[in-house]
Image (cartoon, helix red, strand yellow):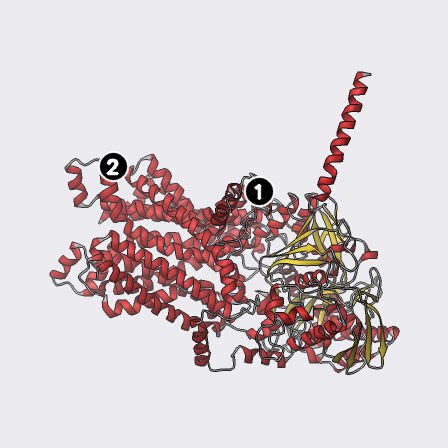
């Protein structure tokens, strides 16, 4: 079996184990959060008998191991149960809200890579010049405030004082297009509406940029630091002495190895965005999963909590798996590692 | 002459142009846009809060409606009704059809009641007194009550009539012989007779309504053709959208500053006085508040004037009116509107002197609802008020869902908590029973965990009494008793204020003679006029 | 040490950073002396002066109960800095050790440690915090514990990846051939090469810790009013945009400037330390 394929299978296997671990932990945690889910769901005026009846229906009176067994049985059928908060199947809720969050995070992630890495490479190549200093200030400012603060500042500047961008939502009412994938950028294109696409992109710009800013700064700084370190390595000096062009050296020898730590951070940042997205979603009234997640936690909606956490965990694991595989692809030493891993 | 001629021609041209465009403008759809807090519960059997009420009162109808601008109930789906011993007989209209086209009959009424009782959620407790309902014929229905109950007729404003046939076609599996009672179906679809149909519903995001052209009372032309009700918009967003004419009516949950900003930006205020009040609840089982004198000391030290300053929005507009006692002005048993409560530090000190506890021994926990930011200011005000008596306090922000849970037990209920409550049917019974009767202790409405025999007796008697003046006298006694044992600081009578654009006129939310006196009923879209 | 400071101050950017950090730390320490209204850090209400825009008397305006915003921001620095420093001081050593051990030793140890890290990483922080709140009293200390519990896995993941790359480097193999012990190799050979990335992440994280703390206080855990807290001020003030912009802009800038200062210094330090090796 080719080593890369073996790595992929290996990572898939471990991801599954982690997911099972997460499901057990979150199952237990959800039951530690104070409050009786049946009482909260039924509202204040429900009688004790009604609460009891709902508890029985939710199997809350069974031992936790039995509850977990029931949960696994349902999960095998693709059923995450009904949310006590929205009274709909949790899978339907997640299908509803996940695309909006994914769209935000994917665009922010792209911004992070497409802006952050080139900035860092540029700074490393023109090290200690004004270019370097400017990029340094920009990227440090970017990482110096949490995305929520950036969201508020960007909104104030570019939606209120200079009304260039819309202040809330995913698309203007007049531009609404039928939902196909749930990704507004894709759905507008599918509908063949370029005006709607531009409108959706304008809605997306500020929240995605606010979410990406710290990642951009972080990616730029790490790339710069690592490239500079690589520049000092003997093989670069050798390449320089052979008279290779600076451009070729930057691209082929310095940039590639310095991607390793940058990619690691980007993978982590991508996952962190799932958490930060909540605050950004709140500021821009973005109808995403993060907001749903907080509501279900507050209402102690057990099925909602477990379902949301599992989906976020799965996303996180997938992203990290991709990063691991990319790392292995870039760095032959990991790929051909002789040590057990 | 030529110029005059030219002007005339120009004027004529304009007129023709107007003549051409005017019908076009009229045929364009009028859209009303508003927002509420999530989640929008479309199932009428589970409806309980304001957003749910808006959904229910537009998609469904009830047998009776509150009289606009006055007390009592007016006919709606029911033409007439009469008491028959402990039961009530209702005669229904025979010209009403559901959105599905099915005719509305007595069987639908029976089904709606049975479903409400079987689900046991939302406001179903209002119908605990009903033993059974039976269809005497297609258009006559009888409710058999277990005992005489005066608030029953007004409770019917919370019994929306559901399309039985449609629900039966869409029954899913459940533990009952009625399957899931249509829970899955009604969570996403409306099956009513209402003036608006629901064309799309997402409980966290938005509900879209369309005008029901076949409504049995007809829907006026000026009423909106479409309505978009969005959930969970940020205050700052709503404020800006209204200023740019992209939004029409805000929720009532905005802080006073934001409402003021909407007014300053050219918007208008809509108000609803709905028989409710703002209450500062004291846990009567926790020292030092288990001593009535300590509670009375806090009540007297509370700055009733300053809180009115906090909730003032504009000239003549505020989120409340001064409190006169335990029962809001305008309700049975209320005190004279001019006898408003005022801060009295001398009385507070006198009460404190008689309290068995030393304030220095305690730190009072003041909880405020995280979702209602103005309560933080109330808390800070109380903190400084009570400090003058020597009480240490600690302010704690508690999300609503957590609070409803803390309230259930006397040990976890905070010393002091803050709620808005109102009479869900307009009857004082629904405002006071759930808050102060010992059998209802330990809900978000009753974190006092009060157990007072006198209060229980008065509440029970007022519920059974039939004559209006007899009930008024009982509630007046109850008012005095509650002021005497002070489980609660009766801070102010609640007025719901909504920020709105000038595109909409809503008499039921601005003209006292058209007001329903029932939370959410003012949002009957058919009674609103779109002015542009 | 003295030499480091001299180098720091020679570069105008890092000198500016030092200045910012010094200002923030000193004002937090000397808050009682420098702020115009020290009593406004508590439960003062002054309804005659509420929600005022910046003026000569109140340079950053007043909040919704009439307290001087400038005074509250200076006091908020105290609690926010303390929180950030304490959380990182606990979380970083734990995470770094886990990452080093897993990355260097490999095998079963790596498998168990990293899967554990993954499990922690993939549970959203709010859920973790709520469950901790369910078991413990909602105090500031426990709030810090909750933040720490959600922070260490990030460092474990970072250091693990770095270690895995480093352990194949020539210098590590050389040390091993020369008979160096595992602990020596991990902490004396590999760790120094990870320091730049760790320091970078730490300076970046300071702002996030401040913010996470504020979302905890929203849930009723951690800093409670009337104690001023920068994150909560930004979050609560956002409701009143754009009219009462000062309620959220000044606390936001306060976070930005403080963390920017730390970042400038951290960045410069990293360069200097790196050059010293």
Crowd rating for badge 1 (residues with CA inside 10 Å; few <14, some 14–19, many 20+): some
- Is B229 located above or below residue B245 in the figure? below
Q: Give the residue at x 62% y 50%.
A: B238
Marker disc for residue A60: none
Rendered location of residue B510, percent (x, y) = 78, 53
Q: Give the residue at x 55% y 80%.
A: A56
Q: Are marks 1 and 2 on the same chain?
A: yes
Marker disc for residue A160: 1
Task: Return the residue found at the far top.
Answer: B1
Residue named by callout 2: A247
- Is B372 located above or below residue A18 in the figure? above
Quarter of the picture holding the C terminus of chain B: top right
Rendered location of residue B308, percent (x, y) = 73, 57
If you read the primary sequence from the N terminus, does the residue marked by circle 1 or circle 2 appear first? Answer: 1
Quarter of the picture holding the N terminus of chain B: top right
- Is A247 located above or below residue B488 in the figure? above
Residue B347 visible within the image: yes
Horizontal placement of B410 versus A31: left or right?
A: right
Label 2 resides on the chain identified as: A
- Mark in front: 1 vs 2: 2
Residue B405 visible within the image: no
Q: Nearer the viewer, residue A197 or B244?
A: A197
């Amino acid at each position: 079996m080719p080593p890369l394929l073996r790595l992929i299978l290996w990572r898939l296997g471990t991801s599954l184990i982690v997911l099972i671990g997460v499901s057990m932990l979150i199952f237990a945690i959800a039951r530690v959060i104070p409050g009786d889910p049946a009482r909260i769901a039924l509202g204040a005026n429900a009688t004790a008998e009604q609460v009891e009846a709902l508890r029985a229906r939710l199997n809350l009176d069974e031992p936790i191991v039995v509850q977990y067994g029931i949960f696994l049985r349902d999960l095998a059928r693709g059923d995450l149960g009904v949310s006590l908060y929205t009274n709909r199947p949790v899978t339907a809720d997640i299908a509803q809200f996940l695309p909006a969050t994914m769209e935000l995070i994917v665009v922010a992630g792209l911004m992070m890579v497409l802006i952050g890495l080139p900035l860092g490479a540029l700074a490393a190549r023109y090290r200690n010049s004004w270019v370097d200093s400017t990029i340094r200030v920009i990227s440090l400012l970017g990482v110096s405030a949490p995305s929520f603060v950036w969201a508020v500042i960007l909104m104030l500047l570019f939606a209120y004082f200079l009304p260039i961008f819309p202040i809330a939502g995913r698309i203007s009412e007049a531009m609404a297009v039928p939902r196909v994938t749930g990704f507004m950028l894709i759905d507008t294109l599918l509908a063949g509406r370029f005006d709607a696409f531009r409108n959706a992109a304008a809605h997306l710009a500020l929240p995605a940029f606010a979410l990406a800013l710290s990642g951009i700064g972080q990616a730029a700084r790490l790339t710069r630091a690592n490239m500079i370190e690589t520049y000092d390595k003997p093989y670069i000096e050798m390449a320089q002495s052979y008279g290779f062009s600076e451009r070729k050296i930057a691209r082929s020898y310095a940039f590639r190895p310095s991607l390793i730590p940058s990619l690691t951070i980007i993978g982590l940042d991508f996952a962190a965005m799932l958490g930060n997205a909540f605050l950004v979603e709140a500021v821009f009234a973005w109808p995403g999963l993060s907001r749903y997640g907080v509501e279900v936690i507050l209402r102690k909606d057990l099925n909602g909590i477990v379902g949301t956490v599992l989906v976020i965990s799965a996303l996180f694991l997938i992203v990290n798996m991709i990063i691991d595989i990319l790392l292995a692809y870039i760095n032959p030493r990991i790929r051909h590692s002789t040590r057990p891993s | 002459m030529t110029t005059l001629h030219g002007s005339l021609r120009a004027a004529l041209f304009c007129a023709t142009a107007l003549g051409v465009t005017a019908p076009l403008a009229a045929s364009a759809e009028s859209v009303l846009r508003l927002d509420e807090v999530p989640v929008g519960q479309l199932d009428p059997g589970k409806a309980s809060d304001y957003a749910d009420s808006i959904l229910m009162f537009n998609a469904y109808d009830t047998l009776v409606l509150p009289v606009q601008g006055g007390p009592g109930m007016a006919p709606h789906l029911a033409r007439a009704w009469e008491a028959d011993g402990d039961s009530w007989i209702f005669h229904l209209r025979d010209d009403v059809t559901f959105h599905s086209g099915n005719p509305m009959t007595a069987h639908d009424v029976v089904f709606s009641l049975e479903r409400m009782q079987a689900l046991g959620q939302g406001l179903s407790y209002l119908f605990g007194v009903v033993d059974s309902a039976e269809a005497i014929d297609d258009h006559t229905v009888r409710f058999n009550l277990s005992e005489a109950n005066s608030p029953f007729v007004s409770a019917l404003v919370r019994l929306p009539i559901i399309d039985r046939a449609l629900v039966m076609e869409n029954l899913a599996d459940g533990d009952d012989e009625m399957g899931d009672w249509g829970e899955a179906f009604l969570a996403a679809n409306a099956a009513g007779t209402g003036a608006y149909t629901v064309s799309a519903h997402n409980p966290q995001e938005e509900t879209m309504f369309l005008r029901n052209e076949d409504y049995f009372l007809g829907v006026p032309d000026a009423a909106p053709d479409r309505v978009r009700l969005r959930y969970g918009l940020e205050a700052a967003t709503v404020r800006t959208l209204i200023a740019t004419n992209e939004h029409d009516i805000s929720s009532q949950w905005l802080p006073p500053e934001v409402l003021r900003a909407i007014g300053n930006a050219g918007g208008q205020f809509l108000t609803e006085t709905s028989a409710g009040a703002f209450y500062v609840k004291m846990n009567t089982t926790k020292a030092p508040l288990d001593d009535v004198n300590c509670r009375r000391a806090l009540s007297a030290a509370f700055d009733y004037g300053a809180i009115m300053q906090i909730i003032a929005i504009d000239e003549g507009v505020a989120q409340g009116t001064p409190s006169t006692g335990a029962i809001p002005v305008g309700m049975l048993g209320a005190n004279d509107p001019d006898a408003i409560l005022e801060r009295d530090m001398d009385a507070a000190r006198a009460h404190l002197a008689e309290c068995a506890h030393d304030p220095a021994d305690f730190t009072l926990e003041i909880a405020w609802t995280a979702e209602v930011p103005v309560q933080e200011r109330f808390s800070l005000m109380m903190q400084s008020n009570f400090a003058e008596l020597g009480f240490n306090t600690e302010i704690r922000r508690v999300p609503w869902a957590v609070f409803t849970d803390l309230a259930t037990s006397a040990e976890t209920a905070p010393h002091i908590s803050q709620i808005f409550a109102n009479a869900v049917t307009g009857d004082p019974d629904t405002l006071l029973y759930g808050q102060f009767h010992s059998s209802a202790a330990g809900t978000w409405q009753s974190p006092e965990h009060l157990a007072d025999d006198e209060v229980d007796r008065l509440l029970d008697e007022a519920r059974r009494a039939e004559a209006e003046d007899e009930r008024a006298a009982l509630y007046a006694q109850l008012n005095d008793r509650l002021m005497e044992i002070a489980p609660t600081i009766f801070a102010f009578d609640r007025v719901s204020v909504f920020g709105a654009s000038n595109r909409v006129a809503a008499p039921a939310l601005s003209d006292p003679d058209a007001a329903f006196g029932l939370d959410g009923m003012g949002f009957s879209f058919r009674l609103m006029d779109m002015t542009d | 040490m003295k030499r480091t400071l001299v180098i720091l101050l020679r570069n105008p950017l890092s000198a500016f950073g030092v200045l910012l950090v010094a200002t923030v730390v000193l004002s937090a320490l000397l808050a009682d002396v420098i702020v115009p209204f020290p009593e406004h850090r508590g439960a003062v209400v002054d309804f005659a002066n509420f929600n005022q825009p910046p003026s000569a008397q109140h340079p950053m305006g007043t909040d919704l109960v009439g307290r001087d915003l400038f005074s509250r921001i200076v006091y908020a620095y105290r609690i926010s800095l303390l929180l950030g420093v304490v959380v990182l001081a606990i979380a970083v050593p734990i995470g770094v050790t886990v990452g080093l051990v897993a990355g260097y030793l490999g095998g079963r140890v790596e498998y168990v440690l990293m899967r554990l890290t993954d499990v922690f990483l993939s549970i959203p922080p709010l859920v973790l915090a709520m469950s901790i709140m369910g078991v413990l009293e909602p105090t500031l200390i426990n709030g810090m514990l909750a933040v720490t519990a959600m922070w260490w896995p990030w460092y474990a993941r970072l250091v693990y990846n770095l270690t895995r790359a480093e352990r194949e480097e020539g210098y590590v193999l050389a040390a091993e051939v020369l008979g160096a012990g595992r602990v020596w190799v991990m902490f004396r050979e590999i760790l120094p090469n990870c320091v730049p990335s760790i320091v970078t992440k730490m300076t970046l994280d300071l702002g996030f810790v401040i913010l996470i703390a504020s979302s905890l206080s929203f849930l009723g855990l951690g800093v409670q009013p009337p104690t001023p807290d920068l994150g909560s001020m930004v979050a609560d003030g956002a409701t009143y945009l754009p009219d009462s912009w000062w309620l959220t802009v000044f606390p936001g800038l306060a976070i930005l400037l403080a963390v920017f200062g730390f970042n400038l210094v951290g960045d410069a330090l990293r360069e200097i330390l790196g050059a010293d090796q």
